Every structure is written in structure tokens, then in C-alpha cells.
Amino acid sequence: MSWAFGAALALVLLAALVLVVSIVRPTSLGDRAVAFDALTSLITCGLLIAAAGTGDGLLLEVALVFGLLGFFGSVTVARFIERSGS
Amino acid sequence: MSAVLDGLSAVFAVVGALLTVVAAIGLLRLGDTRSRMHAATKPATLGVLSCAVAAVLQLDSLSDVSKVVVIVVVQFVTVPAGAHMLARAISRSSTDG
């Protein structure tokens, strides 16, 4: 059954590449912040799928820390946008 | 029974991955920032929940399962708060919204 987790991870990787494209694309700062926010939750998704595929509990702690860091990152960017304009 | 649980777990993992792909397509294709935010916050809750169910069905120790529960609770609290702050900042600072 591990091929299904591999396929799921490949789909998440594809989505992450698309999100990186939409971060690098020249749009407004708010659009990039939204794409960054989506990218962090997507990496949490990928870490959970990897934990399901390998049965490794250490990946769960990485996912927890990564989710919190993504939240702090998007709050910081939101404060910055609010203060300086897009 | 174990094979059934493995199959269910794989189905949940693939559903979560497909939700992330849908969000990425939405971020590329939709027009303005609010529509993109609408597309981007779907995998942040439903996709993470689906992947977490997949992980819970595969992991067997209680400490790992409780870590997954903590991840889901933290994600469900922080993602709406972060998206709300981003939306407020964008709508206060930009002219297109």
C-alpha cells in the first residue's frame, strides 16, 4: 500500500511547485502572503502523509512546529502589510 | 482488518493530496486576492484533517496519535486567525478590494 502514499506525496509536491510559482510570480504582496500561507499548510499535509507512509513519529513533531511557524510567519507578514501598504 | 485500515488510510491520504492540488490550481487561476484566499484555505483545514486521519490509521502508539490530535487542534485554531489577519491587512491597505 506504500505506493498510494508515494503517489499522494507526489501530488503534494506538484502542488507545492505550483505554489512556489505563484509566490515568485510578480503579483501584489498580499497575493504572495496568501500563497505562502497555503504553502505552509500544504507542507504540514505532506509531513502527515509521510508519517502515515513510514510510521515515523518524529515527523509529527516536525509538522507541529512547522504549523506554528507558518502561523507566526503569516501574522508577521499581515502586520507588515497593514503598516506599510501593499 | 489491517488491510481495510491500510486501504482507508491510503484513500484519506490521496484525498488530502488532491485537495492540495485543487488549492494550488485555484491560486493560479482565480482572479483577485479574496478568491485566491477562498481557494487557499480549503486544504489548510479539510486537507490537513484528511491527512491526519490517514496518519492516525497507520500509527499505533498512543503518543503519536495524541500528537496528531494536537496538530489538528493547533491548525484549526491558527489557520482561521491567520487568514483573518491577512484578509484584514489586505483590505485595509489595497485599493482593489
Image (cartoon, grey):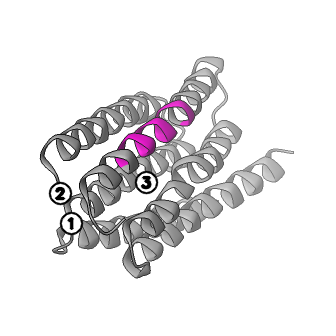
Residue ID for mark 3: A42
Residue ID for mark 1: A28
Q: Secondary structure at mark 2?
A: loop
**What amino acid type should be assigned to the residue bearing mark 2?**
Ser
Q: Secondary structure at mark 1?
A: loop
Q: Is residue B73 above or below residue A44?
A: above
Mark 1 and mark 2 on one chain: yes
Chain under callout 1: A
Residue B60 within the magenta-colored segment of the rendering? no
Q: From the viewer's perspective, is the residue at label 1 or at label 2 nearer?
A: 2
Q: Is residue A59 left or right of residue B56?
A: left
Residue B77 is tagged as none
**What amino acid type should be assigned to the residue bearing mark 3?**
Leu
Q: Are marks 1 and 3 in contact (CB under 8 Å)?
A: no
Image: magenta residue range: B76-86
Q: Is residue A76 above or below residue B19?
A: above
Residue ID for mark 2: A86
Determine which quarter of the picture holds residue B64.
top right
Q: Are marks 3 and 2 in contact (CB under 8 Å)?
A: no
Q: Is residue A17 above or below residue B63?
A: below
Q: Secondary structure at mark 3?
A: helix
- Quadrant where the N terminus of chain B sits is top right
**Distance CA(mark 3)–CA(mark 2):** 25 Å
